[in-house]
Amino acid sequence: MPAITATAPAKIILFGEHAVVYGRPAIAVPLPQLRARAVVSADPFAPAGYIRLQAPAIGLDASLEDMPADDPFSLGVHGVLDILGISRCPACLIRVTSTIPIAAGLGSGAAASVVLVRAFSHFLGQPLENRQVNDLVFKIEKVYHGTPSGIDNTVITYEQPVFYIKDQPIQKFRIARPLTLVIADTGIPSKTAVTVGAVRSGWQADPHRYEALFDQIGRITRQARQALETGEIDALGPLMNDNQAVLQELGVSSPTLENLIQAARQAGAAGAKLSGGGGGGNLIALAANETTQRISQELLAAGAASVLVSNISNTGPLE
């Protein structure tokens, strides 16, 4: 039986993080330069039902039976078996590798789950549809993150720009003109469950104030979608800055993020904001092609751990 491979991209949130958990829209796009990969190969020397999982990036090398029931990879394997109604499968090795930084707000966990679910279901001869992959990975995300929005698994599963509102049909859309982002990693892990939990605590303590902030982010995100669809790229920079100001009010920014965001703006970025859970992780800066090198250099000089320049456009026809 030949080995089966599946890949999936990283993702970046352009607008709407945190507010998306509370029913407001968010915009996210795939980052195809960074990818997770799963390879499933038969193990002819092991007994039927034996599954070994390897993920070098997190030091995982264990048999499925020895893994905690709530481990994301364990949940993925058992989820596929349950959906397909298979109680005992051929012995196999599942190896997951990735170039996506961990805990950086780029969807590394969701991407790993997506490729595992896709490759394993293909290996079993019954590949799951995108909808099934998305639903299963969202269930895994809920165990891992607590109250995720669902945007990570959605944009990564479909690998298309997404306008996402929780519990509503997915809206994939076209970007009229490509845009260039400089993405800087703070080098500080961004624990989504922690920042999401902190926002929830604040919302529970002062729902009126937090709902107003979420509404602001929702309006900004809708304006950003219109700008993306009509090619008004010049409007995006100020909207990024406005979104960042509200995220700062929510308490999910940090001195490190603010320092880097300021450095990007001073170097010529049209706009800059954190992306993802906040606290650490990544920031994004909107750049013209002639300013990307200067912005990248200034971010590194200001303490960014690494910088990636990405051209964001459509990845293919809408499904």
Image (cartoon, grey):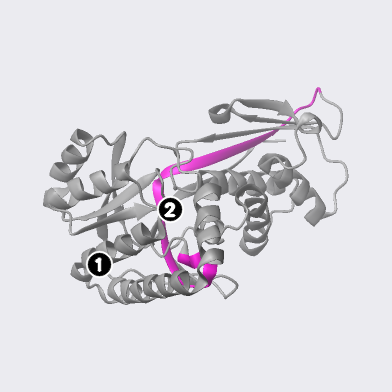
Crowding at dot 1, Cα within 10 Å, few <14 / some 14-19 / many 20+, comes out as many
**Which residue in the structure is indicated by mark 2?**
276
> Marks 1 and 2: which is nearer the front?
2
Whole-percent x, y for residue 160 in the image: 45, 62
Residue at image location 86% in from the left, 27% down from the top: 47
* Mark 1–mark 2 distance (CA, rounded to whole Å): 18 Å
| Quadrant (top left/top right/bottom left/bottom right) for the N terminus | top right
Q: Is residue 220 above or below residue 109?
A: below
Which contiguous range is marked in magenta?
19-45
**Which residue in the structure is indicated by mark 1?**
236
Is 23 within the magenta? yes
Please name the amino acid that badge 1 sits on: Leu
Q: In which quarter of the image is residue 101?
A: top left
Visible residue check, residue 182 = yes
Residue farthest toward the front in the current orientation of the protein: 205
Judged from the image, the secondary structure of the residue bearing numbered disc 1 is: helix
Residue at image location 66% in from the left, 51% down from the top: 140
Whole-percent x, y for residue 11 in the image: 44, 52
Judged from the image, the secondary structure of the residue bearing numbered disc 2 is: loop
Please name the amino acid that badge 2 sits on: Gly
